[in-house]
Structure formats: C-alpha cells, structure tokens
Image (tube, helix red, strand yellow):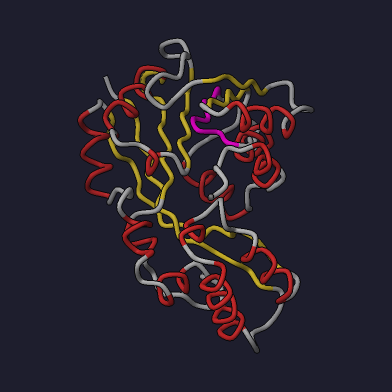
C-alpha cells in the first residue's frame, strides 16, 4: 500500500528541503516580494513560505488541508514570527477578502479538478492589482526526455505506462490562461524554469533517494523489481558524467494580476 503524501512519516521529507536559488531568482525577476503580505496556498512543509520571508516579505500565511503538513511547516518556520499557518483549501482558504498582495500556488493546481474555484478564491483574497503566482508542470514539462540532470524523464522512457498517470491531472497553458481570464485576472508573464530538485554528492546518494521515492511519487506504481530495473537504468545513463549530480525538473510559472 503506498504511503500517503501527507502521512506523518513523510512530513520531514518536505519540511527539511529549501527553495532553490533558481526559484528565488525567477520569482524576484518578475515580482517584488519585499514588504508584501503573501498567502502560500498549498504550503506543504513550508519550504516556500520560509523562502518568501527570507526574500523580504512582510508576512506570509501558509494554507494547507493537511494537519501533518501544517505541523511540519510550523516547525520549519518556528523562528520566523512573520509566518502563520492555518487549515484551508484552494477554494476555501478562510482568509479575509483583499487580505494579501500576492498569492503563491506552487505545485497545487494538478491536485484540483476545478481551476475556476481556485482562481476565484485567489482573486477574492487579493488586493486590487495583486499578483497571483502559479507554478506547476504542464504535460509538456512532464514528458521531456531524460538526460543526466533531468532524471525524471527516464521514468517514462523505461515505463511508458506512467505517462498517463503523470499527465492526466496536468493542465496545459491554454487551460490555465483561460481560467485566469474568466476569474478577473490578466496574465503578465509565462516563464519556464529548470528548478533544481536536489544535488547528490555521488551515485550512491542518488540511488538511495530513488529507492526511497515510492509512496511519495508516481514510482509507487512500480513493483519492487521494476523499481530496481529503473534505478539500474538511471545509474547506467548517469555513469561517467561529472559529479556532483544536479537533478532538475522543468516547471511553468504563470504571473497574473487581479484587475477590477
């Protein structure tokens, strides 16, 4: 039985990671974070809540439906008094109307059946001219071929059946843009970002990480034997390339503004 993403035993996996500098640079290039009030919707373990405070935000409120993730986020940001965490969902955040200058929804929308209710709620809690930042993988992002740094691409090269599992819930840019416009938002920028997932000092670290991903990624669809075959394939593909190993995934980021 796969481990649930929000189970207690998975909580620390997400809370102990840090936002990569590539993400910080991409956000900073398009949005002024300093002195802003921000809602981090689907905050998970608080990785990006913390990053936004460190980028100069005045206050960040993290919202998540998972009690375990909220505990992890509070622990991760325990020394940052300008952070606050509360239970809620993308369509019912329980935040006051026009309460924030920026809404961040990172790795959230592929979990949702309805973009409209999510964006309607984001527009409700944003000030006029407030900014909505959406980050997720489109189907195109997901199915890019594997290479020594885009390790995830090898998953689908070896096991094509995982492609449907990965892309069924993903929205393409046209769907996102249409939903934004329908809910009073105007698209400002669309950016592709190769964000570093993790840096491994050696092949052994990469191997151990891959073997432990079952239960918190699409790899729980594989049998133990299939997982071993996949890991061996990745080790072979990565052999001979320089260390350290920098694993990157491509994301799409949409920046939109709330208009009257």
Q: Main secondary structure of the magenta part?
A: strand
Residue 192 placement, left or right of 259:
right
Residue 201, above or below 139? below
Q: Residue furthest right?
A: 79
Residue 7, above or below 174? above
User: Residue 63's x, y, as percent?
Assistant: 53, 25
Foreground pick, 133 / 168: 168
Q: Residue furthest top?
A: 96
User: Residue 56's x, y, as percent?
Assistant: 65, 32
Residue 250, above or below 187? below
Residue 259 placement, left or right of 144:
left
Residue appearing at x 50%, y 33% in the figure? 42
Classify residue 148 by image quadrant: bottom right
Residue 213 placement, left or right of 29:
right
Instruction: Please report the bounds of the magenta region as a residue range.
Output: 37-44
Q: Residue furthest bottom?
A: 240
Q: Is residue 102 magenta?
A: no
Residue 76, above or below 155? above
User: Residue 149's x, y, as percent?
Assistant: 56, 72
User: Residue 152's x, y, as percent?
Assistant: 49, 67
Classify residue 248 by image quadrant: bottom right
Residue appearing at x 46%, y 14% in the figure? 94
Residue appearing at x 58%, y 55% in the figure? 22
Image quarter hosting the C terminus: top left
């Amino acid at each position: 039985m796969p481990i649930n993403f929000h189970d207690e035993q998975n909580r620390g996996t997400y809370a102990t990671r840090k936002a990569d500098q590539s993400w910080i640079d991409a956000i900073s290039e398009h949005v002024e974070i300093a002195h802003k009030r921000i809602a981090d919707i689907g905050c998970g373990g608080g990785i990006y809540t913390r990053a936004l405070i460190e980028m100069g935000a005045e206050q960040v409120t993290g919202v998540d439906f998972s009690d375990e993730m909220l505990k992890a986020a509070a622990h991760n940001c325990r020394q940052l008094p300008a952070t606050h965490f509360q239970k809620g969902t993308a369509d019912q955040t329980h935040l006051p109307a026009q309460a924030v200058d920026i809404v961040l929804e990172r790795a959230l929308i592929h979990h949702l059946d309805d973009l409209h209710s999510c964006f309607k709620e984001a527009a409700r809690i944003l000030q006029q001219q407030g900014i909505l930042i959406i980050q997720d993988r489109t189907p195109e992002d997901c199915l890019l071929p594997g290479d020594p740094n885009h390790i995830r691409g090898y998953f689908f090269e070896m096991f094509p059946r995982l492609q449907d599992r990965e892309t069924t819930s993903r929205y393409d840019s046209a769907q996102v843009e249409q939903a934004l416009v329908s809910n009073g938002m105007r698209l400002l920028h669309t950016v592709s970002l190769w964000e570093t997932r993790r840096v491994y000092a050696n092949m052994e670290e990469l191997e151990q990480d891959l073997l432990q991903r079952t239960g918190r990624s699409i790899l729980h669809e594989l049998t133990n034997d299939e997982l071993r075959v996949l890991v061996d394939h990745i080790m072979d593909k990565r052999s001979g390339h320089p260390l350290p190993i920098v694993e990157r995934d491509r994301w799409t980021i949409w920046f939109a503004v709330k208009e009257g």
